[in-house]
Image (spheres, helix red, strand yellow):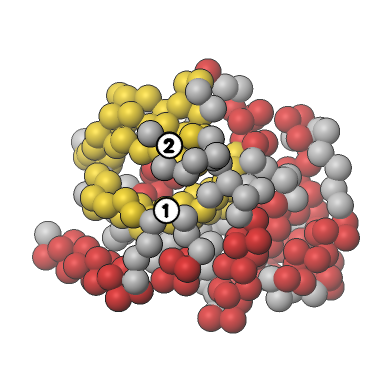
Amino acid sequence: MNEFPGHETLYSLSQVCLSGGGTTILDSIDLKLFSGKLHLMSGSSGSGKTSLLRLLNGMVTPDSGSVMYRGADLLSYDLPQLRSRVAMITQEPVMFPATVEQNIRIPLSYYANSSVEIDERNMIEMLSGLGLNSGILHKEAGSLSGGEKQRVAIVRAMILRPEVLLADEPTSALDQLSEQKVIELFNRLKGDMTQVVVSHSAGFLEIADKIILISGGRIVKECDSMTPAEFAEFLDEEDAGRNNG
Protein backbone atom coordinates (compact mmCIF):
# COMPACT_ATOMS: atom_id res chain seq x y z
CA MET A 1 0.00 0.00 0.00
CA ASN A 2 1.27 3.48 -0.84
CA GLU A 3 2.11 5.26 2.42
CA PHE A 4 1.64 8.68 0.80
CA PRO A 5 -1.58 8.90 -1.24
CA GLY A 6 -1.04 10.93 -4.38
CA HIS A 7 2.70 10.26 -4.39
CA GLU A 8 4.15 7.66 -6.72
CA THR A 9 6.24 4.79 -5.37
CA LEU A 10 9.47 5.80 -7.09
CA TYR A 11 11.74 3.05 -5.76
CA SER A 12 10.80 -0.41 -4.58
CA LEU A 13 13.46 -2.66 -3.09
CA SER A 14 12.64 -6.31 -2.44
CA GLN A 15 14.81 -8.76 -0.48
CA VAL A 16 17.99 -6.93 -1.46
CA CYS A 17 21.22 -8.49 -0.24
CA LEU A 18 24.73 -7.17 -0.76
CA SER A 19 28.08 -8.46 0.43
CA GLY A 20 31.71 -7.48 0.05
CA GLY A 21 35.00 -8.84 1.28
CA GLY A 22 33.26 -11.84 2.77
CA THR A 23 31.03 -9.59 4.89
CA THR A 24 27.28 -9.07 4.67
CA ILE A 25 26.64 -5.37 3.99
CA LEU A 26 22.87 -5.41 3.38
CA ASP A 27 20.55 -8.22 4.40
CA SER A 28 17.01 -8.75 3.07
CA ILE A 29 16.17 -5.09 2.51
CA ASP A 30 12.54 -4.31 1.68
CA LEU A 31 11.93 -0.60 1.16
CA LYS A 32 9.71 1.85 -0.71
CA LEU A 33 10.69 5.44 -1.49
CA PHE A 34 8.13 7.99 -2.65
CA SER A 35 8.15 10.82 -5.18
CA GLY A 36 8.52 14.33 -3.81
CA LYS A 37 9.28 13.12 -0.28
CA LEU A 38 12.38 13.50 1.88
CA HIS A 39 13.62 10.21 3.29
CA LEU A 40 16.13 10.35 6.15
CA MET A 41 18.35 7.28 6.61
CA SER A 42 20.55 6.89 9.65
CA GLY A 43 22.61 4.33 11.51
CA SER A 44 26.10 3.83 12.85
CA SER A 45 29.21 3.75 10.68
CA GLY A 46 29.28 0.47 8.78
CA SER A 47 25.56 -0.17 9.14
CA GLY A 48 25.05 -0.26 5.36
CA LYS A 49 23.32 3.06 4.83
CA THR A 50 25.86 4.46 2.33
CA SER A 51 25.83 1.19 0.37
CA LEU A 52 22.04 1.37 0.25
CA LEU A 53 22.30 4.91 -1.08
CA ARG A 54 24.77 3.78 -3.75
CA LEU A 55 22.38 1.04 -4.87
CA LEU A 56 19.83 3.69 -5.83
CA ASN A 57 21.87 5.09 -8.72
CA GLY A 58 23.57 1.88 -9.77
CA MET A 59 26.99 2.53 -8.24
CA VAL A 60 26.75 -0.98 -6.78
CA THR A 61 24.48 -3.86 -7.72
CA PRO A 62 22.81 -6.31 -5.33
CA ASP A 63 23.89 -9.92 -4.98
CA SER A 64 20.22 -10.88 -4.88
CA GLY A 65 16.82 -9.25 -4.73
CA SER A 66 15.58 -6.40 -6.91
CA VAL A 67 15.81 -2.62 -7.04
CA MET A 68 12.93 -1.19 -9.07
CA TYR A 69 12.86 2.43 -10.24
CA ARG A 70 9.65 3.73 -11.79
CA GLY A 71 8.44 0.15 -12.14
CA ALA A 72 11.48 -1.12 -14.07
CA ASP A 73 14.54 -2.98 -12.82
CA LEU A 74 17.31 -0.48 -12.16
CA LEU A 75 19.72 -2.72 -14.07
CA SER A 76 17.70 -2.14 -17.25
CA TYR A 77 18.52 1.58 -17.31
CA ASP A 78 21.36 3.21 -19.20
CA LEU A 79 23.52 4.31 -16.27
CA PRO A 80 24.59 7.75 -17.60
CA GLN A 81 20.94 8.55 -18.35
CA LEU A 82 19.89 7.27 -14.93
CA ARG A 83 22.50 9.38 -13.16
CA SER A 84 21.35 12.50 -14.98
CA ARG A 85 18.01 11.93 -13.23
CA VAL A 86 19.39 10.55 -9.96
CA ALA A 87 22.16 12.83 -8.66
CA MET A 88 24.38 11.85 -5.75
CA ILE A 89 26.37 13.98 -3.32
CA THR A 90 29.11 12.03 -1.56
CA GLN A 91 30.32 12.81 1.95
CA GLU A 92 33.71 13.92 0.64
CA PRO A 93 32.94 15.49 -2.76
CA VAL A 94 35.47 15.18 -5.55
CA MET A 95 36.69 18.54 -6.81
CA PHE A 96 38.63 18.69 -10.07
CA PRO A 97 41.69 20.97 -10.53
CA ALA A 98 39.70 23.88 -11.92
CA THR A 99 37.67 26.83 -10.71
CA VAL A 100 34.51 26.37 -8.68
CA GLU A 101 32.38 27.47 -11.62
CA GLN A 102 34.08 24.95 -13.91
CA ASN A 103 33.48 22.26 -11.31
CA ILE A 104 29.80 23.15 -11.10
CA ARG A 105 29.54 22.97 -14.90
CA ILE A 106 31.35 19.62 -15.27
CA PRO A 107 28.16 17.47 -15.22
CA LEU A 108 26.81 19.54 -18.12
CA SER A 109 29.62 18.20 -20.31
CA TYR A 110 28.31 14.63 -20.10
CA TYR A 111 26.28 13.54 -23.10
CA ALA A 112 23.36 12.47 -20.91
CA ASN A 113 23.06 16.10 -19.74
CA SER A 114 23.54 17.74 -23.14
CA SER A 115 19.98 19.10 -23.12
CA VAL A 116 20.37 20.81 -19.73
CA GLU A 117 20.82 24.57 -19.86
CA ILE A 118 22.38 26.25 -16.87
CA ASP A 119 20.54 29.11 -15.22
CA GLU A 120 23.37 31.31 -13.95
CA ARG A 121 21.08 33.45 -11.81
CA ASN A 122 19.74 30.30 -10.16
CA MET A 123 23.29 29.05 -9.59
CA ILE A 124 24.26 32.28 -7.84
CA GLU A 125 21.03 32.29 -5.82
CA MET A 126 21.69 28.73 -4.64
CA LEU A 127 25.24 29.61 -3.62
CA SER A 128 23.97 32.67 -1.78
CA GLY A 129 21.27 30.64 -0.06
CA LEU A 130 23.99 28.34 1.24
CA GLY A 131 26.07 31.24 2.56
CA LEU A 132 28.51 31.47 -0.36
CA ASN A 133 28.94 34.65 -2.39
CA SER A 134 29.38 34.69 -6.17
CA GLY A 135 33.09 35.45 -5.81
CA ILE A 136 33.69 31.81 -4.91
CA LEU A 137 33.00 30.87 -8.55
CA HIS A 138 36.44 32.18 -9.54
CA LYS A 139 38.35 30.38 -6.79
CA GLU A 140 40.32 27.22 -7.40
CA ALA A 141 38.22 24.36 -6.07
CA GLY A 142 41.24 22.79 -4.41
CA SER A 143 41.56 25.81 -2.10
CA LEU A 144 38.11 25.35 -0.57
CA SER A 145 37.45 24.14 2.95
CA GLY A 146 35.60 20.87 3.49
CA GLY A 147 32.38 22.71 4.27
CA GLU A 148 32.66 24.87 1.16
CA LYS A 149 33.24 21.78 -0.97
CA GLN A 150 30.10 20.17 0.44
CA ARG A 151 27.98 23.20 -0.39
CA VAL A 152 29.47 23.56 -3.90
CA ALA A 153 28.75 19.86 -4.46
CA ILE A 154 25.10 20.46 -3.52
CA VAL A 155 24.85 23.25 -6.11
CA ARG A 156 26.61 21.06 -8.69
CA ALA A 157 24.01 18.34 -8.17
CA MET A 158 21.06 20.75 -8.13
CA ILE A 159 22.10 22.47 -11.34
CA LEU A 160 21.04 19.32 -13.21
CA ARG A 161 17.51 19.69 -11.82
CA PRO A 162 17.46 15.95 -11.04
CA GLU A 163 14.38 13.94 -10.26
CA VAL A 164 16.10 12.35 -7.27
CA LEU A 165 18.80 13.73 -4.97
CA LEU A 166 20.87 11.26 -2.96
CA ALA A 167 22.94 12.96 -0.26
CA ASP A 168 25.48 11.20 1.97
CA GLU A 169 26.11 13.24 5.14
CA PRO A 170 25.71 16.56 3.27
CA THR A 171 26.26 18.66 6.42
CA SER A 172 29.00 16.69 8.21
CA ALA A 173 31.67 19.38 7.66
CA LEU A 174 29.41 22.38 8.31
CA ASP A 175 28.92 24.65 11.27
CA GLN A 176 25.43 24.98 12.75
CA LEU A 177 24.44 28.06 10.71
CA SER A 178 25.61 26.57 7.41
CA GLU A 179 23.90 23.28 8.23
CA GLN A 180 20.62 25.10 8.81
CA LYS A 181 20.90 26.79 5.41
CA VAL A 182 21.36 23.39 3.74
CA ILE A 183 18.36 21.96 5.62
CA GLU A 184 16.26 24.96 4.56
CA LEU A 185 17.24 24.39 0.92
CA PHE A 186 16.34 20.69 1.11
CA ASN A 187 13.02 21.61 2.69
CA ARG A 188 12.20 23.99 -0.18
CA LEU A 189 12.88 21.18 -2.66
CA LYS A 190 10.30 18.86 -1.14
CA GLY A 191 7.49 18.19 -3.57
CA ASP A 192 9.64 19.02 -6.59
CA MET A 193 12.36 16.48 -5.95
CA THR A 194 12.61 13.11 -4.23
CA GLN A 195 15.38 13.21 -1.62
CA VAL A 196 17.20 10.46 0.22
CA VAL A 197 19.51 11.87 2.87
CA VAL A 198 21.94 9.84 4.96
CA SER A 199 22.68 11.86 8.08
CA HIS A 200 23.33 11.76 11.80
CA SER A 201 21.99 15.30 12.14
CA ALA A 202 18.78 15.66 14.12
CA GLY A 203 18.11 18.84 12.14
CA PHE A 204 16.71 16.74 9.29
CA LEU A 205 14.09 15.21 11.58
CA GLU A 206 11.93 18.32 11.30
CA ILE A 207 11.65 18.10 7.50
CA ALA A 208 11.79 14.31 6.94
CA ASP A 209 8.64 12.63 5.62
CA LYS A 210 10.02 9.17 6.31
CA ILE A 211 12.77 8.08 8.71
CA ILE A 212 14.63 4.83 8.04
CA LEU A 213 16.92 3.42 10.73
CA ILE A 214 19.52 0.84 9.73
CA SER A 215 21.55 -1.48 11.92
CA GLY A 216 23.82 -4.31 10.87
CA GLY A 217 22.71 -4.15 7.27
CA ARG A 218 19.02 -4.43 8.10
CA ILE A 219 16.22 -1.88 8.37
CA VAL A 220 15.17 -1.95 12.01
CA LYS A 221 12.60 0.85 11.98
CA GLU A 222 10.59 3.01 9.57
CA CYS A 223 8.48 5.89 10.85
CA ASP A 224 7.20 9.32 9.84
CA SER A 225 8.41 11.19 12.93
CA MET A 226 10.86 10.89 15.79
CA THR A 227 11.99 13.17 18.58
CA PRO A 228 15.62 14.32 18.72
CA ALA A 229 15.94 12.43 22.02
CA GLU A 230 14.74 9.17 20.44
CA PHE A 231 17.06 9.72 17.48
CA ALA A 232 20.06 10.38 19.72
CA GLU A 233 19.23 7.33 21.85
CA PHE A 234 19.19 5.08 18.77
CA LEU A 235 22.53 6.41 17.53
CA ASP A 236 24.11 6.15 20.98
CA GLU A 237 22.96 2.53 21.30
CA GLU A 238 24.29 1.76 17.83
CA ASP A 239 27.67 3.29 18.59
CA ALA A 240 27.84 1.46 21.92
CA GLY A 241 27.01 -1.86 20.23
CA ARG A 242 29.60 -1.27 17.52
CA ASN A 243 32.30 -0.41 20.05
CA ASN A 244 31.45 -3.48 22.14
CA GLY A 245 31.30 -5.72 19.07
Q: Quadrant of residue 228?
A: bottom left
Disc 2 marks which residue? 2
Q: Nearer the viewer, residue 88 or 221?
A: 221
In this view of the protein, can residue 193 be seen by the observer? Answer: yes
Q: Position of residue 217 (x, y in %)?
A: 26, 45
Q: Residue visible at 36% across and 38% down?
A: 31
| Mark 1 surroundings: few (<14), some (14-19) or many (≥20) residues within 10 A | many
Q: Amino acid at mark 2?
A: Asn
Query: Compared with residue 91, is residue 81 higher up or lower down, i.e. above or below?
Result: above
> Tags 1 and 2 in contact by the CB under 8 Å rule?
no
Q: Which label is found at residue 57?
A: none
Q: Position of residue 166 (x, y in %)?
A: 53, 48
Q: Residue visible at 42% across and 32% down?
A: 12
Disc 1 marks which residue? 210
Q: Position of residue 107 (x, y in %)?
A: 73, 43
Q: Residue visible at 53% across and 49% down?
A: 37
Q: Residue visible at 77% across and 72% down?
A: 128
Q: State the quadrant of the N terminus.
A: top left
**Numbered disc 1: secondary structure:** strand
In this view of the protein, can residue 18 be seen by the observer? Answer: no
Q: Is residue 59 left or right of residue 52?
A: right
Q: Position of residue 40 (x, y in %)?
A: 43, 56
Q: Amino acid at mark 1?
A: Lys
- Work out whether mark 1 precedes mark 2 in sequence or the reverse, and give the earlier one: 2
